[in-house]
Image: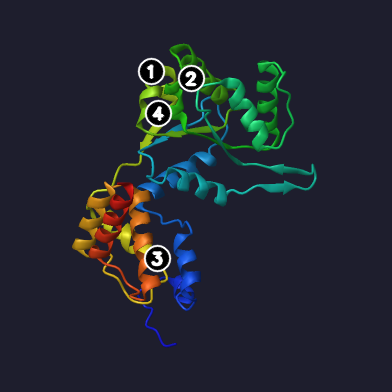
Amino acid sequence: MMLDLSHLAGPAKEQAFQDAKARIHLVQTARWVGFSRAQMAVEELERRYHYPTCARMPCMLLYGDSGMGKTMILEKMERQHPSTLDERRQIKLRPVLTVQMPPSPDERRFYTRILEILGAPYSIREQLGALEGRVIHLLQKLGTKLLFIDEVHHLLAGSHREQRRALNLLKFMTNELKIVVVVVGTSDAFHALQTDLQVASRFEPLLIPRWTATDAFRSFVVAYGKLLPLRKPSPFGEPEMIHALIKQSDGITGRVTWLIGRAAEIAIGDGTEQIDAASIERVSERLRAVAL
Protein backbone atom coordinates (compact mmCIF):
# COMPACT_ATOMS: atom_id res chain seq x y z
CA MET A 1 0.00 0.00 0.00
CA MET A 2 1.48 3.35 -1.09
CA LEU A 3 0.61 6.06 1.42
CA ASP A 4 1.92 9.56 1.97
CA LEU A 5 2.36 9.59 5.73
CA SER A 6 4.51 12.68 6.02
CA HIS A 7 1.91 14.19 8.38
CA LEU A 8 2.71 11.57 11.05
CA ALA A 9 5.51 11.24 13.61
CA GLY A 10 7.89 8.26 13.45
CA PRO A 11 6.06 5.42 15.25
CA ALA A 12 2.65 6.44 13.88
CA LYS A 13 3.90 6.02 10.30
CA GLU A 14 4.40 2.30 10.84
CA GLN A 15 1.19 1.99 12.84
CA ALA A 16 -0.81 3.51 9.98
CA PHE A 17 -0.31 0.29 7.98
CA GLN A 18 -2.12 -1.80 10.61
CA ASP A 19 -5.78 -2.75 10.26
CA ALA A 20 -8.61 -0.59 11.58
CA LYS A 21 -9.14 -2.57 14.80
CA ALA A 22 -5.46 -2.35 15.75
CA ARG A 23 -5.27 1.35 14.95
CA ILE A 24 -8.39 2.16 16.97
CA HIS A 25 -6.79 0.36 19.92
CA LEU A 26 -3.65 2.47 19.45
CA VAL A 27 -5.74 5.66 19.43
CA GLN A 28 -7.28 4.62 22.74
CA THR A 29 -3.86 4.07 24.34
CA ALA A 30 -2.65 6.90 26.59
CA ARG A 31 0.41 8.78 25.34
CA TRP A 32 2.69 11.50 26.67
CA VAL A 33 2.78 14.81 24.80
CA GLY A 34 5.02 17.29 26.56
CA PHE A 35 3.13 20.58 26.41
CA SER A 36 4.95 23.60 27.80
CA ARG A 37 3.46 23.76 31.31
CA ALA A 38 3.76 20.00 31.80
CA GLN A 39 7.36 20.09 30.58
CA MET A 40 8.07 22.89 33.04
CA ALA A 41 6.61 20.75 35.83
CA VAL A 42 8.76 17.77 34.82
CA GLU A 43 11.88 19.93 34.72
CA GLU A 44 11.10 21.37 38.17
CA LEU A 45 10.49 17.88 39.56
CA GLU A 46 13.69 16.61 37.99
CA ARG A 47 15.65 19.46 39.57
CA ARG A 48 14.18 18.60 42.95
CA TYR A 49 14.85 14.89 42.46
CA HIS A 50 18.58 15.62 42.21
CA TYR A 51 18.59 18.17 45.05
CA PRO A 52 21.19 17.45 47.77
CA THR A 53 19.80 16.39 51.14
CA CYS A 54 19.27 19.31 53.49
CA ALA A 55 17.15 20.30 56.49
CA ARG A 56 14.47 21.96 54.35
CA MET A 57 13.96 20.14 51.05
CA PRO A 58 12.32 22.04 48.15
CA CYS A 59 8.84 20.52 48.18
CA MET A 60 6.08 21.37 45.72
CA LEU A 61 2.32 21.67 45.31
CA LEU A 62 1.26 20.66 41.79
CA TYR A 63 -2.35 21.67 41.25
CA GLY A 64 -5.01 22.29 38.62
CA ASP A 65 -8.44 21.13 37.52
CA SER A 66 -9.15 17.42 37.13
CA GLY A 67 -8.16 16.23 33.67
CA MET A 68 -5.31 18.71 33.20
CA GLY A 69 -2.62 16.02 32.99
CA LYS A 70 -1.22 15.99 36.53
CA THR A 71 -1.31 12.18 36.71
CA MET A 72 0.54 11.94 33.38
CA ILE A 73 3.29 14.15 34.86
CA LEU A 74 3.62 11.83 37.86
CA GLU A 75 3.75 8.78 35.59
CA LYS A 76 6.39 10.49 33.45
CA MET A 77 8.62 10.90 36.51
CA GLU A 78 8.05 7.28 37.51
CA ARG A 79 9.13 6.14 34.03
CA GLN A 80 12.23 8.32 34.17
CA HIS A 81 13.19 6.87 37.56
CA PRO A 82 11.90 3.28 37.62
CA SER A 83 12.33 0.75 40.38
CA THR A 84 15.64 -1.13 40.27
CA LEU A 85 17.03 -4.17 42.04
CA ASP A 86 19.84 -3.65 44.51
CA GLU A 87 21.59 -6.99 43.93
CA ARG A 88 23.86 -6.67 46.94
CA ARG A 89 20.98 -6.21 49.39
CA GLN A 90 18.41 -8.04 47.24
CA ILE A 91 15.80 -5.33 47.63
CA LYS A 92 13.82 -3.36 45.08
CA LEU A 93 14.67 0.33 45.26
CA ARG A 94 11.79 2.81 44.81
CA PRO A 95 13.28 6.21 43.98
CA VAL A 96 9.85 7.64 43.10
CA LEU A 97 6.72 6.63 44.99
CA THR A 98 3.12 7.77 44.51
CA VAL A 99 0.43 7.37 47.15
CA GLN A 100 -3.10 8.79 47.28
CA MET A 101 -4.39 10.76 50.22
CA PRO A 102 -7.33 8.75 51.66
CA PRO A 103 -10.84 10.06 50.81
CA SER A 104 -10.97 11.43 54.36
CA PRO A 105 -7.82 12.61 56.18
CA ASP A 106 -6.62 9.61 58.19
CA GLU A 107 -3.01 9.00 59.20
CA ARG A 108 -3.47 5.26 59.75
CA ARG A 109 -5.00 4.72 56.30
CA PHE A 110 -2.27 6.83 54.75
CA TYR A 111 0.54 4.79 56.31
CA THR A 112 -1.09 1.42 55.61
CA ARG A 113 -1.63 2.44 51.98
CA ILE A 114 2.12 3.08 51.61
CA LEU A 115 2.87 -0.32 53.16
CA GLU A 116 0.41 -1.96 50.74
CA ILE A 117 2.07 -0.29 47.74
CA LEU A 118 5.47 -1.49 48.95
CA GLY A 119 4.17 -5.00 49.60
CA ALA A 120 5.07 -4.77 53.28
CA PRO A 121 2.97 -6.69 55.84
CA TYR A 122 1.16 -4.90 58.64
CA SER A 123 -1.45 -5.57 61.28
CA ILE A 124 -4.65 -3.57 61.68
CA ARG A 125 -3.95 -3.69 65.42
CA GLU A 126 -0.56 -1.95 65.14
CA GLN A 127 -0.14 1.30 67.00
CA LEU A 128 -0.06 4.42 64.83
CA GLY A 129 3.47 5.21 66.02
CA ALA A 130 4.68 1.77 64.94
CA LEU A 131 3.16 2.17 61.46
CA GLU A 132 4.68 5.62 61.16
CA GLY A 133 8.14 4.42 62.16
CA ARG A 134 8.02 1.46 59.76
CA VAL A 135 7.00 3.63 56.82
CA ILE A 136 9.82 6.10 57.51
CA HIS A 137 12.33 3.25 57.84
CA LEU A 138 11.15 1.56 54.63
CA LEU A 139 11.24 4.71 52.51
CA GLN A 140 14.77 5.40 53.72
CA LYS A 141 15.84 1.80 53.10
CA LEU A 142 14.34 1.77 49.59
CA GLY A 143 16.10 5.00 48.62
CA THR A 144 12.94 7.00 47.96
CA LYS A 145 13.91 10.49 46.78
CA LEU A 146 10.57 11.79 45.53
CA LEU A 147 7.25 11.11 47.26
CA PHE A 148 4.06 12.11 45.45
CA ILE A 149 0.94 12.48 47.58
CA ASP A 150 -1.96 12.62 45.11
CA GLU A 151 -5.54 13.79 45.71
CA VAL A 152 -4.35 16.01 48.55
CA HIS A 153 -7.53 18.11 48.19
CA HIS A 154 -9.16 15.31 50.22
CA LEU A 155 -7.79 17.27 53.18
CA LEU A 156 -10.95 19.34 52.93
CA ALA A 157 -13.17 16.29 53.36
CA GLY A 158 -12.50 15.95 57.08
CA SER A 159 -13.32 17.94 60.16
CA HIS A 160 -11.16 20.88 61.19
CA ARG A 161 -9.30 18.61 63.62
CA GLU A 162 -8.69 15.97 60.91
CA GLN A 163 -7.44 18.64 58.53
CA ARG A 164 -4.97 19.90 61.13
CA ARG A 165 -3.68 16.38 61.73
CA ALA A 166 -3.27 15.80 58.00
CA LEU A 167 -1.36 19.06 57.60
CA ASN A 168 0.85 18.10 60.53
CA LEU A 169 1.43 14.76 58.79
CA LEU A 170 2.77 16.59 55.73
CA LYS A 171 5.11 18.65 57.92
CA PHE A 172 6.30 15.51 59.70
CA MET A 173 7.02 13.67 56.44
CA THR A 174 9.12 16.52 55.06
CA ASN A 175 11.02 16.95 58.34
CA GLU A 176 11.62 13.28 59.10
CA LEU A 177 12.40 11.91 55.65
CA LYS A 178 14.37 14.87 54.28
CA ILE A 179 13.24 14.00 50.78
CA VAL A 180 11.20 15.97 48.27
CA VAL A 181 7.47 15.61 48.96
CA VAL A 182 5.14 16.74 46.16
CA VAL A 183 1.46 17.13 46.96
CA VAL A 184 -0.92 16.98 44.00
CA GLY A 185 -4.53 18.00 43.65
CA THR A 186 -7.13 20.49 42.48
CA SER A 187 -7.34 24.17 43.38
CA ASP A 188 -8.94 23.04 46.65
CA ALA A 189 -5.51 21.62 47.56
CA PHE A 190 -4.01 25.09 47.24
CA HIS A 191 -6.64 26.54 49.56
CA ALA A 192 -6.24 23.65 52.03
CA LEU A 193 -2.50 24.24 52.37
CA GLN A 194 -2.97 27.99 52.78
CA THR A 195 -4.71 27.37 56.11
CA ASP A 196 -1.31 26.58 57.64
CA LEU A 197 1.36 29.16 56.85
CA GLN A 198 4.18 26.79 57.82
CA VAL A 199 2.93 24.11 55.42
CA ALA A 200 2.22 26.64 52.67
CA SER A 201 5.77 27.99 52.91
CA ARG A 202 7.23 24.51 52.41
CA PHE A 203 5.31 23.65 49.23
CA GLU A 204 6.03 25.89 46.25
CA PRO A 205 2.84 26.01 44.13
CA LEU A 206 2.85 25.23 40.40
CA LEU A 207 -0.45 25.60 38.59
CA ILE A 208 -1.40 23.64 35.46
CA PRO A 209 -3.97 26.10 34.03
CA ARG A 210 -6.78 25.42 31.60
CA TRP A 211 -6.00 25.92 27.95
CA THR A 212 -6.91 28.97 25.93
CA ALA A 213 -6.50 29.47 22.18
CA THR A 214 -2.77 30.19 22.31
CA ASP A 215 0.20 29.13 20.18
CA ALA A 216 1.10 26.70 22.99
CA PHE A 217 -2.29 25.00 22.68
CA ARG A 218 -1.98 24.85 18.91
CA SER A 219 1.46 23.22 19.24
CA PHE A 220 0.05 20.68 21.70
CA VAL A 221 -2.84 19.76 19.38
CA VAL A 222 -0.56 19.45 16.35
CA ALA A 223 1.92 17.28 18.28
CA TYR A 224 -0.90 15.06 19.56
CA GLY A 225 -2.35 14.72 16.06
CA LYS A 226 0.99 13.52 14.67
CA LEU A 227 0.81 10.50 16.99
CA LEU A 228 -2.56 9.25 15.71
CA PRO A 229 -2.28 6.61 12.93
CA LEU A 230 -4.69 8.34 10.51
CA ARG A 231 -3.81 7.72 6.87
CA LYS A 232 -4.75 11.23 5.71
CA PRO A 233 -3.65 14.60 7.10
CA SER A 234 -6.01 16.55 9.35
CA PRO A 235 -6.07 20.35 9.92
CA PHE A 236 -5.04 20.08 13.58
CA GLY A 237 -3.43 23.52 13.68
CA GLU A 238 -6.16 25.41 11.83
CA PRO A 239 -8.13 28.11 13.71
CA GLU A 240 -11.45 26.32 13.20
CA MET A 241 -10.12 23.16 14.85
CA ILE A 242 -8.53 25.09 17.71
CA HIS A 243 -11.73 27.05 18.34
CA ALA A 244 -13.88 23.90 18.28
CA LEU A 245 -11.60 22.09 20.73
CA ILE A 246 -11.46 24.98 23.21
CA LYS A 247 -15.22 25.46 23.02
CA GLN A 248 -16.12 21.80 23.48
CA SER A 249 -13.45 20.95 26.08
CA ASP A 250 -13.56 24.05 28.32
CA GLY A 251 -9.77 23.96 28.05
CA ILE A 252 -9.40 20.66 29.93
CA THR A 253 -6.54 18.56 28.53
CA GLY A 254 -8.29 15.23 29.13
CA ARG A 255 -11.38 16.38 27.24
CA VAL A 256 -9.27 17.73 24.38
CA THR A 257 -7.50 14.41 23.88
CA TRP A 258 -10.76 12.47 24.31
CA LEU A 259 -12.52 14.54 21.64
CA ILE A 260 -9.63 14.15 19.19
CA GLY A 261 -9.27 10.46 19.97
CA ARG A 262 -12.97 9.68 19.62
CA ALA A 263 -13.13 11.57 16.32
CA ALA A 264 -10.07 9.63 15.13
CA GLU A 265 -11.70 6.31 16.07
CA ILE A 266 -14.75 7.20 14.00
CA ALA A 267 -12.59 8.36 11.07
CA ILE A 268 -10.69 5.06 11.07
CA GLY A 269 -13.90 3.05 11.40
CA ASP A 270 -15.75 4.75 8.54
CA GLY A 271 -12.70 5.02 6.29
CA THR A 272 -12.52 8.82 6.06
CA GLU A 273 -9.10 8.68 7.80
CA GLN A 274 -9.07 12.36 8.78
CA ILE A 275 -10.83 14.69 11.18
CA ASP A 276 -11.70 18.40 11.24
CA ALA A 277 -13.63 20.92 13.34
CA ALA A 278 -16.92 19.44 12.19
CA SER A 279 -15.79 16.02 13.44
CA ILE A 280 -15.11 17.50 16.87
CA GLU A 281 -18.55 19.15 16.92
CA ARG A 282 -20.27 15.88 15.97
CA VAL A 283 -18.48 13.94 18.71
CA SER A 284 -19.43 16.57 21.27
CA GLU A 285 -23.06 16.58 20.12
CA ARG A 286 -23.16 12.78 20.35
CA LEU A 287 -21.80 12.94 23.89
CA ARG A 288 -24.43 15.47 24.92
CA ALA A 289 -27.16 13.31 23.38
CA VAL A 290 -25.98 10.29 25.37
CA ALA A 291 -25.88 12.37 28.58
CA LEU A 292 -29.53 13.31 28.04
Q: Nearer the viewer, residue 205 or 116?
A: 116
- Structural distance between the alpha carbons of marks 3 and 4: 36 Å
Q: Is residue 57 above or below residue 38?
A: above
In three-dimensional space, the C-alpha distance between marks 1 and 3, rounded to whole angstroms, equals: 46 Å
Say whether disc 1 or disc 4 marks the residue closer to the N-terminus: 4
Q: Is residue 237 visible?
A: no
User: Which residue is labeled 3 in the image?
Assistant: 265
CB atoms at circles 2 and 1 under 8 Å apart? yes
Viewer-nearest of discs 1 and 3: 3
> Residue 285: image x %, image y %?
26, 55
User: Which residue position is annotated with label 1?
Assistant: 195
Residue sitting nearer the eye, 191 or 203: 191
Q: Report which residue position mark 2 lands on.
A: 167
Q: Residues within 10 Å of mark 3 (few under 14, many from 20)?
A: many
Q: Secondary structure under badge 1?
A: loop
Q: CA distance from mark 2 to mark 1?
A: 9 Å
Mark 1 Cα within 10 Å, few/some/many (few <14, many 20+)? few
Q: Amino acid under label 2? A: Leu
Q: Is residue 81 left or right of residue 61?
A: right
